[in-house]
Image: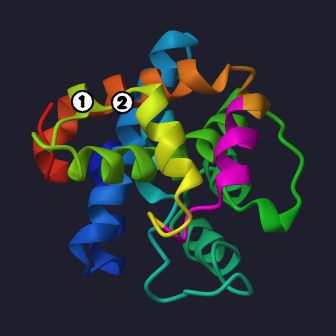
Amino acid sequence: MHRDDAWNILVEYSREERTRKHGLAVEATMQAYARLLHEDVEKWGIVGLLHDFDWEIHPTEELHPREGSKLLEARGVPADIRYAILCHAPFLGLEYTSKMDRAIFACDELSGFVTACALVKPGKSLSEVDPASVRKKMKDKAFARAVNRDDLVRGAADLGVELDEHIRFVAEALKPVAHQLGVNA
């Protein structure tokens, strides 16, 4: 599978700009971790890009991402990509079988949370986001209330990275796509 194929699937199923932006953010963080870990950058990016492609048509835990995985299978998307996408949903209770499975869970919510943190900074810049400011926002339950704070912490732990380092890494990984996300680098 190639990145262009994944983008076309995302665009076909995701009409909302925020869903597409989130896919781009998670793609960027997954690619950065793939480079760091000497893994397949394109494959990891595809997992990030597609992980929520079906959210708009399957917006419940009963359906997302299970039903989306069936759609991807019908399109010939490789099993390891589909499995990693399923692993971003902790409520499925799947066992991680690869670093890619761990990384998608670790990158998913934190990518969105870090972007939200940048949006409330005076310069709307990722350069203004640091671990202390993210941790402070994590304590504010009204901020990005849909994000499960325990998942942010668990994602870093499952990936084997200290949370502050994970926050720094994600903020840096988002900088190349900052303009697409509506923030400054």
Q: Residues within 10 Å of mark 2 (few under 14, many from 20)?
A: many
Which color mode does the image show? rainbow
Residue at point 26%, 44% (across, down): 118
Q: Which residue is mark 2?
A: 171
The tag on residue 64 is: none
Q: Which residues are magenta?
A: 145-156
Q: Earlier in the sequence, mark 2 or mark 1?
A: 1
Please state if 185 lies on the left or on the right of 140 as rendered.
Answer: left
Please state if 177 lies on the left or on the right of 169 as rendered.
Answer: left
Considering depth in this image, is 157 or 80 the residue closer to the camera?
Answer: 157
The nearer-to-camera label among 2 and 1 is: 1
Q: Which residue is mark 1?
A: 128
Distance from disc 2 to disc 1, alpha carbons, whole Å, reads 9 Å
Report the number of discs.
Answer: 2
> Is residue 94 rendered magenta in the image?
no
Task: Answer whether labels 2 and 1 touch (C-beta < 8 Å).
Answer: no
Considering depth in this image, is 31 or 132 the residue closer to the camera?
Answer: 132
